[in-house]
Image (spheres, helix red, strand yellow):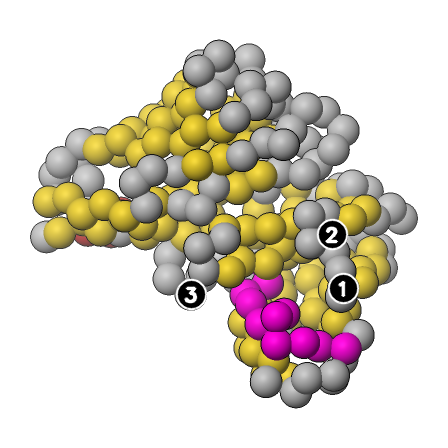
Amino acid sequence: NAGVTQTPKFQVLKTGQSMTLQCAQDMNHNSMYWYRQDPGMGLRLIYYSASEGTTDKGEVPNGYNVSRLNKREFSLRLESAAPSQTSVYFCASRHRENTEAFFGQGTRLTVV
Amino acid sequence: KQEVTQIPAALSVPEGENLVLNCSFTDSAIYNLQWFRQDPGKGLTSLLLIQSSQREQTSGRLNASLDKSSGRSTLYIAASQPGDSATYLCAVGPPTGTYKYIFGTGTRLKVLA
């Protein structure tokens, strides 16, 4: 049972380049989340998907787009990367609101 | 706006000591609260989830309590071990329907052998 799987684990982009971070969960969870973690700022919610077919903005959505491809997969796209998007990105999922969240291992992104 | 604070930011204790980690939140209208552990360079691992109707949850050497009226949760770790060294984060779940969990910035724990 893999849980939440994120790819890639590391990525270096040049300013202006685009990329998609992939996330897949095999626990049949309904809701999925994308967070970024920055030193001193904790985890901040970028986007979430409460259920298949729906997505909503979190605290810091600017510069990002998401797609809930199916119940298993939730991708995060950076259309034109900026140095301010250098961060560690985490995907998470949970079955329902009153159940615990499970996190992937993270993607360390550097934009130069 | 809900704010979640964890103090202290860092803590060093000798092996075997019992310790308490604190999580404070400003809005008592919460749905649940979850404690996580994060090892360096890794993702978050769920430790305990407390529903708003519960006062505490226990798992092995860990015990988490919740006092909504005072806006506090504590994570008690009994007989600490070097393997407990990690960053501990709490996340507060908002009232039903929003999914926007708010995280504290964590307490970095080091247990000395």
Q: Position of residue B47 (x, y in %)?
A: 43, 38
Check disc 1 and give the amino acid type: Tyr
Q: CA distance from mark 1 to mark 3?
A: 23 Å
Q: Nearer the viewer, residue A77 or B78?
A: A77
Q: Is residue B77 left or right of residue A108?
A: left
Asked whether the beta carbons under mark 2 and mark 1 sit within 8 Å of each other, the answer is: yes
Q: Please say whether residue B36 is visible from this viewpoint.
A: no
Neighbor class of circle 3 (other Cα within 10 Å; few <14, some 14-19, many 20+) is few
Q: Position of residue B11 (x, y in %)?
A: 23, 45
Secondary-structure class at tag 1: strand
To which residue does mark 3 refer?
B41
Secondary-structure class at tag 2: strand
Task: Name the residue: 89% across, 48% down.
Answer: A53
Q: Is residue B36 left or right of residue A109?
A: left
Neighbor class of circle 2 (other Cα within 10 Å; few <14, some 14-19, many 20+) is many
Secondary-structure class at tag 3: loop
Check disc 2 and give the amino acid type: Tyr
Region of the chain picked out in magenta, as a range: A80-90
Q: Is residue B43 left or right of residue B64?
A: right
Q: Please say whether residue B21 is visible from this viewpoint.
A: yes
To which residue does mark 2 refer?
A47
To which residue does mark 1 refer?
A64
Above or below, A84 against A44 in this view is below
Q: CA distance from mark 2 to mark 1?
A: 8 Å
Task: Name the residue: 59% across, 58% down.
Answer: A36
Above or below, A4 against A28 in this view is below
Badge 1 and badge 3 both on one subunit: no
Q: Position of residue B71 (x, y in %)?
A: 47, 21
Tell me the subunit letter for badge 1: A
Q: Quadrant of residue A94?
A: top right
Q: CA distance from mark 3 to mark 2?
A: 22 Å
